[in-house]
């Protein structure tokens, strides 16, 4: 391969790497948005549960809410969104 062909190949590879970097950045951004949406959803549910639990005379409702909370905690443990978010952050910061 002569210098001209090598330079052309390097230019093509650079363009491809830049394109892949942009695509990866878009995927990371999408994953961050999904993570943020899930976190916000859990926050809203937990806020609503907290408000309902504070009321008196709602023992049956409190029991049901406790069951829902347990299920939510199981979901949070099964799908470690915090860990996923940290991994996404480290990828976006180039620390991976």
Image (cartoon, rainbow, N blue to C red):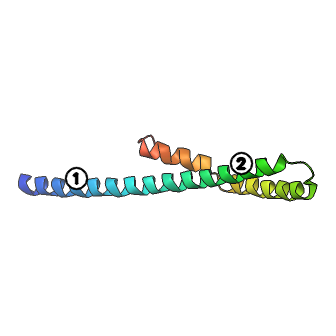
Q: Nearer the viewer, residue 57 or 35?
A: 57
- Whether tag 1 and tag 2 are in contact, CB under 8 A, the answer is no
* Relative horizontal placement of residue 54, taking residue 34 as reference (left or right): right
**From mark 1 to mark 2, how far is it between C-alphas?**
49 Å
Q: Residues within 10 Å of mark 1 (few under 14, many from 20)?
A: few
Question: Which type of secondary structure does the marked residue at label 1 adopt?
Answer: helix
> Residue at point 61% right, 46% down?
82
Residue 41 in the image: above or below residue 54 = below
* Quarter of the image where one finds residue 75: bottom right
Earlier residue among tags 1 and 2 = 1
Name the spot of residue 77 as percent of width and height, x first: 71, 52
Q: Which residue is under mark 2?
A: 47
> Residue at point 22% right, 53% down?
14
Q: Which residue is under mark 1?
A: 14
* Relative horizontal placement of residue 59, taking residue 18 as reference (left or right): right
Name the spot of residue 22 as percent of width and height, x first: 32, 54
Name the spot of residue 49 as percent of width and height, x first: 77, 52
Q: Nearer the viewer, mark 1 or mark 2?
A: 2
Q: Nearer the viewer, residue 40 or 23?
A: 40
> Residue at point 16% right, 57% down?
9
Question: Which type of secondary structure does the marked residue at label 2 adopt?
Answer: helix
Pick the quarter of the image with the N terminus. bottom left
> Residue at point 65% right, 56% down?
79
């Amino acid at each position: 391969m002569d210098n001209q062909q090598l330079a052309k190949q390097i230019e093509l590879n650079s363009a491809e790497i830049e394109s892949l970097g942009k695509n990866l950045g878009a995927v990371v951004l999408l994953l961050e948005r999904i993570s943020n949406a899930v976190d916000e959803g859990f926050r809203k549910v937990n806020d609503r549960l907290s408000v309902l639990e504070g009321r008196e005379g709602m023992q049956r409702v409190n029991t049901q809410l406790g069951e829902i909370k347990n299920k939510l905690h199981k979901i949070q443990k099964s799908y470690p969104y915090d860990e996923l978010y940290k991994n996404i952050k480290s990828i976006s910061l180039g620390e991976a």
